[in-house]
Amino acid sequence: MPAYAYTAVGPGGAPEAGVLEAAGRSEALRALAARGLRPTSLREEGAPAAGKAADRRLGPALQLPFLEALDDLVRGGLSAGEAVRLLSQRLQPGPLRELCAAVWARLGEGLALSAALGAFPRVFDSHAVNLVAAGEATGNLQGVLGRLIRHYAEQREFRQRLLAALLYPAVMVVAASAVTAFLILFLLPRLEPLLASLGGELPWATRLLVGLAEAAMVAAPIGLLAALAALVAVRRWRRTDAGREAADTLLLRVPVAGALSLRLSVLNFCETLASLIENGITLAQALRMAERSAPNRALRRRLRAATDRVLEGEALSRALGRTGAFPGLLLDRITVAEQTGNLAPGLRDVARSYRADLDRWLAALTKGFAAALLGGVFALVALIAFAIVSAVFAASGNLRF
């Protein structure tokens, strides 16, 4: 008899997981329902996971469009199942329609919407699946969809602003590198024989650039191969749990990159925790889920320890303060939210203001980096121009008419 691995939500809202034997998927679902469990995922042991068996085009980028399309129809009065069925038939052919058809197929097997979404972990994260399950349990699916859409839309906008802020410095680095490589590796080696044929000693700036060009011609291929080998080795190392933990710990110590990683992790934690509590998830469950939203594993370990202390009775603000990642003013605001009984709205306000602070910090960092980069590029180009012009003048002084 086939065995089915499941994860489910119990009558009290606590998550459960296990394996049961049943003649088929429908019988397994009925057995879970008889035990008062609401499944969030159900997979036959030994069978490929649904998300991996699905088309590889079904990725995280489809999560927000799916939720937006579903919310439009649910607000129009359709049930969630009927809305998914309609989307699977009416959307234009493409990845989103394939996703809707696959979700509808899971619904047809008797799964709840949250369980159907959980069958596609490459598309829907645990945050969305658990909130949809909470909306189904409370009968407030429409409100949950609206909050999820707002949450993911804010995250998308922030990622776009972050990429836009980093785009200009990246373009400047590429342009400066290209110009420098052209002048040192292409133009200067062709001028050197001409200048040497005119006789006389080359100026110090020209000799410096010639030496740099000769060294670059030898070191560039070796450096490139070494960098590629190091990149491959580091990526393989980071795939291990110990390697990822050590790399994330080291990242937090890097001046700018560490500060950015820390701020992003704190922002994700506050936003996720606020969204979960707003949708009726208990604080204990919300903290366990929110701690996994931190992209840095070293900080995630600190947040896990803070969650343990909260479950032991310690105040949330004090437990978070022990992580060393949260600013004092942010902790004071969380303390006020706890004392007034408005933790979810307080966390939402904290996340909103912290996002604004992060935007200002990124803008200032980008401007400073761009100014320093421009100054360095101008200095380098000036040195190259000075070296070439001084060499030409020195050579012209040796001409005899």
Image (cartoon, rainbow, N blue to C red):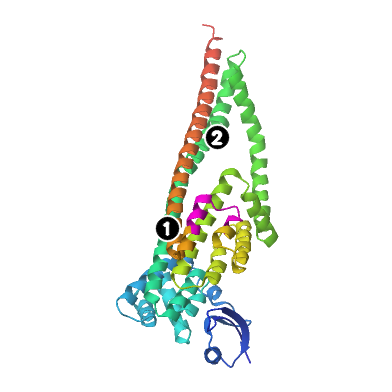
* CA–CA distance in space, label 2 to label 1: 49 Å
- The answer to whether any part of residue 240 appears in the image is no
Q: Amino acid at mark 1?
A: Asp
Which amino acid type corresponds to the residue marked 2 in the rendered image?
A: Ala
The kind of secondary structure element at disc 2 is helix
Quarter of image, res 363? top left
Residue 172 to residue 297: above or below: above
Give how far across and how far down residue 161 sits, in percent: 42, 51
Q: Nearer the viewer, residue 73 or 362?
A: 362
Kindly identify which residue carries mark 1: 349
Q: Which residue, given by chain and number where applicable, does mark 2 sit on?
A: 181
Q: At which x and y percent is residue 87?
A: 36, 76
Kindly state the secondary structure of the residue where label 1 is placed. helix
Query: Which residues, given as a range, are shown in magenta?
Result: 320-335
Predominant secondary structure, magenta span: helix
Badge count = 2
Query: Residue 182, image x and y in percent?
Result: 53, 33
For residue 224, say whether it is visible. yes
29 sits left or right of 298 in the view: left
Instruction: Inspect the magenta stretch and tell me whether residue 319 lies in it.
Output: no
Look at the image and say whether residue 331 sits in the magenta stretch: yes
In the image, taking residue 397 as reference, residue 85 lies left or right, namely left
Residue 86 vs residue 384, the one in the foreground: 86
**With respect to residue 326, does 67 lie above or below?**
below
> As displayed, is residue 239 above or below residue 213?
below
- Image location of residue 269, percent across then percent down: 52, 60
Q: Given this view, does label 2 or label 1 mark the residue nearer the observer? A: 1
| Quadrant of the drawing holding the N terminus | bottom right
Q: Residue at x 51, y 19 (%)?
A: 389
